[in-house]
Amino acid sequence: MEKSHCLDCFLLVLCLFASLVSSQTSPDSPTMEKLKASLKIPSSLNWSDPDPCKWPHVGCKNQRVTRIQIRLQNVGGTLAPDVKYLSELQIFEVMNNQIGGPIPSFAGLRQLQVANFHTNNFSSFPADFFTGLSSLSQIYLDYNPFDPWEIPESIKEATTLTTFSANKVNIQGRFPGLFDYVTFPSLQNLHLAMNNLTGELPAWLAGSSISSLWVNGQSLNGTIQVIQNMSSLQEVWFHGNRFSGPLPDFSMLYGLQQLSLRDNQFTGVVPMSLINLKTLHIVNLTNNELQGPTPKFADGVNVDMIPGLNRFCLDDPGVACDERVNILLSIMEAVGYPEIFADNWKGNDPCNNWLGIACAQGNIVSILFVKKGLTGTISSNFSKLTSLTTLVLSGNNLTGTIPEELTTLPNLTRLDVSNNNLYGEIPSFSSKVALITFGNPGLGKDKPPRPEGMSPGGSPGGGGLSGNGVKKSNRFFI
Ligand SMILES: *[C@@H]1O[C@H](CO)[C@@H](O)[C@H](O)[C@H]1NC(C)=O
Ligand SMILES: *[C@@H]1O[C@H](CO)[C@@H](O)[C@H](O)[C@H]1NC(C)=O
Ligand SMILES: *[C@@H]1O[C@H](CO)[C@@H](O)[C@H](O)[C@H]1NC(C)=O
Ligand SMILES: *[C@@H]1O[C@H](CO)[C@@H](O)[C@H](O)[C@H]1NC(C)=O
Ligand SMILES: *[C@@H]1O[C@H](CO)[C@@H](O)[C@H](O)[C@H]1NC(C)=O
Ligand SMILES: *[C@@H]1O[C@H](CO)[C@@H](O)[C@H](O)[C@H]1NC(C)=O
Ligand SMILES: *[C@@H]1O[C@H](CO)[C@@H](O)[C@H](O)[C@H]1NC(C)=O
Ligand SMILES: *[C@@H]1O[C@H](CO)[C@@H](O)[C@H](O)[C@H]1NC(C)=O
Ligand SMILES: *[C@@H]1O[C@H](CO)[C@@H](O)[C@H](O)[C@H]1NC(C)=O
């Protein structure tokens, strides 16, 4: 029958056409062959078919390669620079192999979402890698023996990044100033641990939405106050650096689960805002110079806080310090808990040979903090040390005013604040107090002296002398 014959013909043509199409190899075939050759793909991976779209661990769409996923396949060799011609590539994963040589540029791969190079033997990372990578969401470079490098400026083109992970890859220099929130609104994971970064945490971190920040195991220093506004933080790994100063206020870190601060030089009292944090799961504080009472965290918090490796007054968690210790620590809070005092002040008895402290019958009678590099203010809490006869704070960099409260110290005979940066009215002390105030250009004036040109509207030379006996104390604190 003619009709069925025709149908046969049609089916035959269709069959022929289909087999023609299927035998047609991908336009990415030459590039993939180069890649296969440079990578020394083991035969076990069976990249043998003429069509790379049939290779195991390779994915295609419309005959174009979109995925290469060869993790843990014993792959060696090097990565051919031709990868950047795989213009439809979305996912590239070669982690856990032994691939060496330089990572080639991926510039222009606009579809690329994931690039994972971790745990290989790559020798370097190119400056133009990120050029045009406008879809990149995650990149992992960790554990490669790169030549010393810095994160290149081209990263700023990868504005859709959520994860930048580069632990132990020999990154040098200052903490990168590149990942600000405006450029990287989606960044969640910034992992830069075990590199050779130096200097302080940058201010741009404050406004970021980062939830996991790993910078442990290098030489970062300065304080970590910048994290107190990073309310998206869940994991903070800062251990094994040279961070110092007091811990920040944690009350805005609503989601913090892991806080690893061990092996640094933190000082000061562990704040209640941390101890009371409901979300906290792991906290590592061992080997710092933390002061005050040993913190008592809620049951269920995993605490790494080996006794004797901080400067807590007592080893028992939650037990209050001696009142004299509390007063001295509140005084130190006003000068940022300097390390020389944190290091020296051991135990719970300030009369036991503490730096700058002299006692009589267990009462603190003399405080000599001469040229100790103190910056900050004079705490009004000195007035709680009622046995004080001598208070010498000369040769530091103290600012603010002389607290009125000091006039209440009944036995004070000597107050020396010479050579600081104090300002404002001098409170009136009893005539038995020898008051030494020279070397404070702002004392007697009602505004702090400022370097010229730095104070908008501030008149050089201060706001004029304050009249004797005129009460205007609060003005000085504004
Ligand atoms: C290797 O791939 C070819 C072509 O895709 C296939 O015919 C063959 O069965 C595969 N061999 C093994 C051992 O998987
Ligand atoms: C890694 O690369 C170096 C050269 O850069 C080479 O000497 C070494 O053998 C390689 N290691 C492995 C495990 O392939
Ligand atoms: C870089 O850091 C590694 C540890 O991550 C360390 O072994 C190495 O000595 C450091 N290199 C330099 C030059 O500081
Ligand atoms: C931090 O280290 C740098 C050198 O890397 C040094 O110049 C700077 O003074 C240090 N800052 C602090 C606060 O210790
Ligand atoms: C951090 O928060 C405090 C208090 O809300 C605010 O005064 C300060 O300006 C903020 N700092 C930054 C860098 O956002
Ligand atoms: C932090 O403490 C937890 C819980 O004790 C522990 O499992 C982890 O290994 C500690 N981290 C470091 C870096 O020591
Ligand atoms: C004085 O000490 C108290 C109790 O420790 C503290 O709450 C307060 O902030 C301190 N005042 C100053 C000015 O340091
Ligand atoms: C002040 O000194 C007198 C005489 O030395 C002494 O008796 C008194 O206890 C002292 N006051 C305080 C509060 O220590
Ligand atoms: C005091 O601090 C100012 C600015 O903070 C600084 O320029 C100056 O060198 C410091 N003086 C001393 C003696 O440390």
Image (cartoon, rainbow, N blue to C red):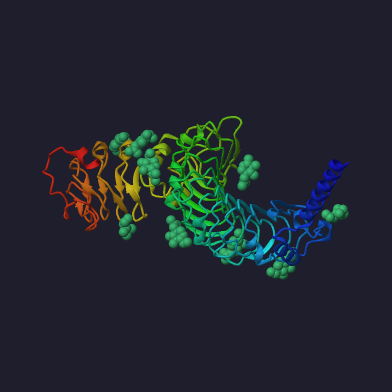
Please say if 403 is above or below 343: above
Judge from the rendering whether residue 402 lies leftward or rightward of residue 272; answer left or right: left
Q: x, y (%) of residue 374? A: 35, 52
Give the residue at x 88% y 41%: 1
In this orientation, does residue 344 appear? no
Whole-percent x, y for residue 145 in the image: 65, 63
Q: Nearer the viewer, residue 160 or 347?
A: 160
**Regarding ligand 7, which quadrant of the image does it lie in?**
top left
Q: Quadrant of the C terminus?
A: top left
Residue 6 picture location, percent across and down: 83, 45
Which residue is situated farthest in the right direction here? 1
In-image side of 453 versus 138 (left or right) = left
Q: Position of residue 314 (x, y in %)?
A: 52, 38
Position of 5 compared to 431: left or right?
Answer: right
Q: Nearer the viewer, residue 461 or 257?
A: 257
Against 120, residue 334 (above or below) is above
